[in-house]
Image (cartoon, rainbow, N blue to C red):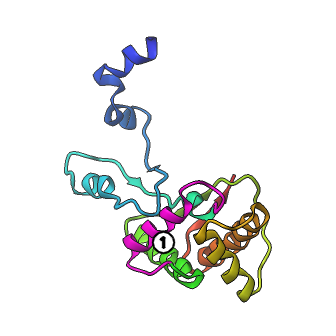
């Protein structure tokens, strides 16, 4: 109750706290499909003195065993303008969205998975598992193998585009 009451006061509004704590940069975590319009609004706001940058957070697109994963990957394709029916398309869609985030000021890609293991798959195997995951028929070990392979892809992308890859 005490905190809820404080948050109604002007001194505890986000802009006031940003200034009072002398924050120079605040990084948010954002879904790869986010249009980042809130970030654009802050950049365009002449009354906003701070800097808020997006952080690319692709977790839900790497967890093929989670409910809704096929729909999320389809949405990623729609937003990126890339057909994600294939593994290669999924990778390209991620690269497109990462470039968009970088253009909007992103400096980091943030990952939180049950494990940070990595293991490369042969092209034919990753293609097969990706198709099974899209169809909802991938086994739990296959979903883990796909995530571990995709984490390697995320690391490769970070070395190429400069987004710092954070794992936790």
- Residue 14 at what x, y percent from top left? 35, 34
Is 131 situated left or right of 74 in this image?
Answer: right
**Quadrant the N terminus occupies:** top left
Which residue sits furthest left? Answer: 46
> Is residue 60 shown in magenta?
no
> Is residue 68 shown in magenta?
yes
Is 127 situated left or right of 9 in this image?
Answer: right
Along the line of sight, the residue nearer the viewer: 56 or 61: 61
Is 7 situated left or right of 47 in this image?
Answer: right
Q: Residue at x 44, y 57 (%)?
A: 54
The residue labelled by disc 1 is: 98
- Callout 1 crowding tier (Cα within 10 Å): few <14, some 14–19, many ≥20: many
Task: Determine which quarter of the picture holds residue 33.
Answer: bottom left
Task: Determine which quarter of the picture holds residue 163.
Answer: bottom right
Task: Determine which quarter of the picture holds residue 62.
Answer: bottom right
Query: Which contiguous range is marked in magenta?
Result: 63-84
Q: Is residue 146 above or below residue 52?
A: below
- Residue 128 at what x, y percent from top left? 69, 81
**Secondary structure at numbered mark 1:** helix
Q: Residue at x 62, y 65 (%)?
A: 136
Q: Is residue 73 above or below residue 153?
A: above
Is 116 situated left or right of 84 in this image?
Answer: right
- Residue 38 at what x, y percent from top left? 31, 52
Q: Is residue 131 above or below residue 62?
A: below
């Amino acid at each position: 109750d005490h905190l809820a009451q404080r948050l109604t006061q002007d001194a505890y509004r986000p802009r006031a706290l940003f200034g009072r704590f002398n924050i120079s940069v605040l990084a948010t975590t954002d879904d790869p499909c986010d249009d980042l319009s809130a970030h654009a609004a802050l950049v365009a706001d002449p009354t906003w003195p701070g800097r808020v940058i997006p952080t690319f957070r692709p977790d839900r697109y790497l967890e093929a065993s989670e409910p809704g994963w096929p729909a999320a990957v389809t949405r990623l394709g729609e937003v990126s303008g890339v057909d994600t029916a294939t593994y290669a398309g999924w990778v390209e869609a991620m690269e497109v969205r990462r470039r968009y985030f970088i253009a909007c000021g992103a400096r980091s890609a943030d990952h939180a998975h049950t494990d940070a293991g990595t293991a490369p798959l042969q092209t034919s195997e990753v293609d097969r598992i990706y198709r099974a995951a899209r169809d909802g028929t991938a086994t739990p070990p296959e979903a883990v193998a796909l995530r571990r392979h995709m984490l390697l892809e995320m690391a490769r992308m970070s070395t190429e585009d400069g987004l710092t890859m954070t794992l936790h």
